Image (tube, rainbow, N blue to C red):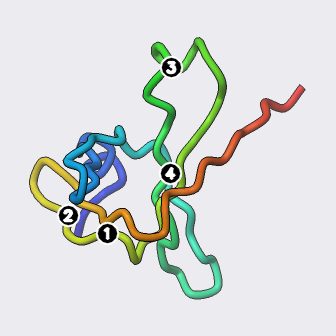
Amino acid sequence: MITLSELQIKDIIIVEEGRRLGNITDLEIDEERGRITHLVVGNKGKVMGLFGKDEEITIPWDQILTIGTDVILIRKSGNPQLATSHPVE
């Protein structure tokens, strides 16, 4: 079994490009099935979560190739979706 905090410290790498996307900030879960549907990756352009746009990339669970000791390898097919979060005022 693996915990969210263990997943959050792993780098997410796109295999075809060798490019680092960032780290997991959250998970999307299908409540009816009790399964993870997407990984949520925070915008790496933000400084300590304070500056810049509040954007996230969601990666479908079926794009994950493997979860290793230090990295999570994903395939590029079906580009990760960019989702903008709007802060509640």
Could you say whether the residue bearing mark 4 is in a helix, strand or loop? strand
- First in sequence: mark 4 vs mark 2: 4
Q: Gap in Å between the C-alphas at discs 1 and 3?
A: 24 Å
**Mark count:** 4
Q: Residue at x 26, y 43 (%)?
A: 19
Which quarter shows the C terminus? top right
Question: Relative to residue 5, is residue 44 drawn left or right?
Answer: right
Q: Gap in Å between the C-alphas at discs 4 and 3?
A: 15 Å
Q: Gap in Å between the C-alphas at discs 4 and 2?
A: 15 Å
Could you say whether the residue bearing mark 2 is in a helix, strand or loop? strand
Image disc number at residue 40: 4
Q: Gap in Å between the C-alphas at discs 4 and 1?
A: 13 Å
Could you say whether the residue bearing mark 3 is in a helix, strand or loop? loop
- First in sequence: mark 4 vs mark 1: 4
- First in sequence: mark 2 vs mark 3: 3
Q: Cβ–Cβ below 8 Å for labels 4 and 3?
A: no
- First in sequence: mark 1 vs mark 3: 3
Q: Residue at x 29, y 48 (%)?
A: 12
Which residue lies under the disc numbered 3? 46
Q: Residue furthest front?
A: 17
Residue 18 lies, with reference to residue 89, above or below; the image says below
At which x and y percent is residue 36? 48, 72
User: Of discs 2 and 1, which sits in the foreground?
Assistant: 1
Residue 63 lies, with reference to residue 39, above or below; the image says below
Image disc number at residue 64: 1
